[in-house]
Amino acid sequence: MSPFSPFSKEELLPQAEMLEIKKRKGELFIGLPKEIYSQEKRVCLTPDAVAALTTHGHRIVIETGAGEGANYTDKEYSDAGAKISYDVKEAFGCNIVLKVEPPTLDEIEMIQPQSVLISALQLKTQTKKYFETMAKKRITAVAFDYIKDEHGAFPIVKSLSEIAGTASIIIAAELMSNANNGNGLLLGNIGGVPPTDVVILGAGTVGEFAARSAIGLGARVKVFDNSITKLRRLQRHLGSIYTSTIQPKTLAKALMRCDVVVGAIRGKNRSPVIVSELMIEQMKGGAVIVDVSIDRGGCFETSKVTSHTKPTFEKHGVIHYCVPNIPSRYSRTASVSISNIFTPYLLDIAESGGFEQAARFDKSLRNGMYFYHGILTNKTVADWFGLPFRDINLLIL
């Protein structure tokens, strides 16, 4: 080669080609402990979901009795390929722990360091110590109620809201019956009998599904919301409903005439109180209030939290139903709904080669993540408790 050539001898030699390596599938080791909160009867995975996961070679440990609240037996889970454990520590000792309710401090102590926890966050019920304990364990935690999909929707929250909306009308219908010391009205429309009047506060998912159910029974439905866009969308989808922005005089008149009112107004932090005690005093005797917003403080001035065991109280002759977590009343439906969303996520995590790889490419998982190896990655939590915060997008490259 000429000494004046611009290329060296080494540069002209054949170079090794870099080939893309196929992603290696990861085997998941999943634990489902039994929920210990007395009102919680849901479970994250149904036996069918367990069968789908074990068929792909994943191992699942379920604490005995974990599915009883949703009427799933240990045998059904065992037949689906899960290991039934009589030791709660074994379920918490898996690499991935699935729960509906957030774990207690004692349960966090049973979780292995560097494990992945997927559960609800329920920020309002937590303490600073809760997050400090998680940080010490270097846990990676995902709040399923914060998971946002590619369309900007929160799939699990939306699904549970659909259940809560439908259930609110069913519950109201039960409370109006003589069997429950109600006013004896049938929620619906019978020939020759005036239809029941239902007022719904809020035109979101809960309000939409409450309206669908009430219309299906033949009730006259009025929906109030301050979002014209939501009201238009609802009217376009459902047709024969009355809609209005929240104006005190118009709302007060509607409440005086109604038999049922469903509260489904949500605010950024707490729900705004839009129905005063004076408005409730002017309602019919025996009318029913179902405050679905009670988990965020409630949107009626007279609302106070009740439980599934004692769900109602009476104030000014009006029956109030103010139970948070309405979907757990229909635990089997709610479990199937949650499981249908969890299962594809878990299969995708395995297909990607494990949680780390999945989080790297799946933005929805990162949206739900509030701890990454013990580092707090949710700004809302950090601001709420005055804890240090790091952006998850700078930690996962």
Image: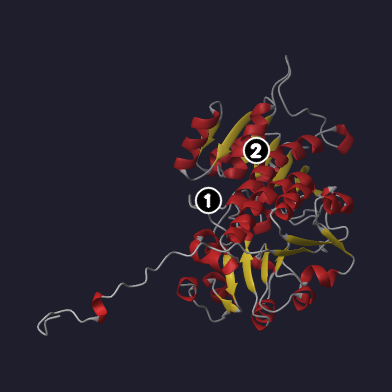
Q: Could you say where residue 30 lies in the image, as x and y percent from the top left? A: 73, 63
Q: How is the image coloured?
A: secondary structure
How far is mark 2 from mark 1, CA to CA?
A: 19 Å
Task: Please tell me which residue is depicted at 75% across the width and 61% down the height of the picture.
Answer: 59
Q: Is residue 21 above or below residue 235?
A: below
Q: Tell me residue 271's x, y (percent).
A: 60, 56
Would you say 122 lies left or right of 360 here?
A: right
Answer with the quarter of the image where residue 130 lies. bottom right
356 or 263: nearer the eye? 356
Rendering coords of residue 8 (x, y %): 20, 82
Please indicate whether residue 326 sits to the left or right of residue 266 in the image: right
| Residue shown at 44% from the left, 64% from the top | 20
Q: Please tell me whether mark 1 sits on a helix, a strand or a loop.
A: loop
Question: Is 253 drawn above or below residue 336 in the view shown?
Answer: above
**Dot 1 crowding, Cα within 10 Å, few <14, some 14–19, many 20+:** few
Q: Nearer the viewer, residue 316 or 198?
A: 198
Task: Identify the residue position indicated by label 1 in the image.
Answer: 153
Density class for disc 2 (Cα within 10 Å; few <14, some 14-19, many ≥20) is: many
Q: Indicate which disc residue 271 carries.
A: none
Q: Dot 2 lies on which element?
A: helix
From the image, tell me which residue sits under label 2. Answer: 210
Label 1 amino acid?
A: Ala
C-beta proximity under 8 Å, tags 2 and 1: no
Residue 375: quadrant of the picture: bottom right
Q: In the shown orientation, is residue 247 left or right of residue 335?
A: left
Amino acid type assigned to the residue bearing label 2 in the image: Ala
Q: Position of residue 113 (x, y in %)?
A: 69, 79
Answer left or right for 78 relative to 159: right
Q: Does residue 264 show up?
A: no
The quarter holding residue 5 reads bottom left
Q: Residue at 54%, 56% (x, y): give it.
A: 148
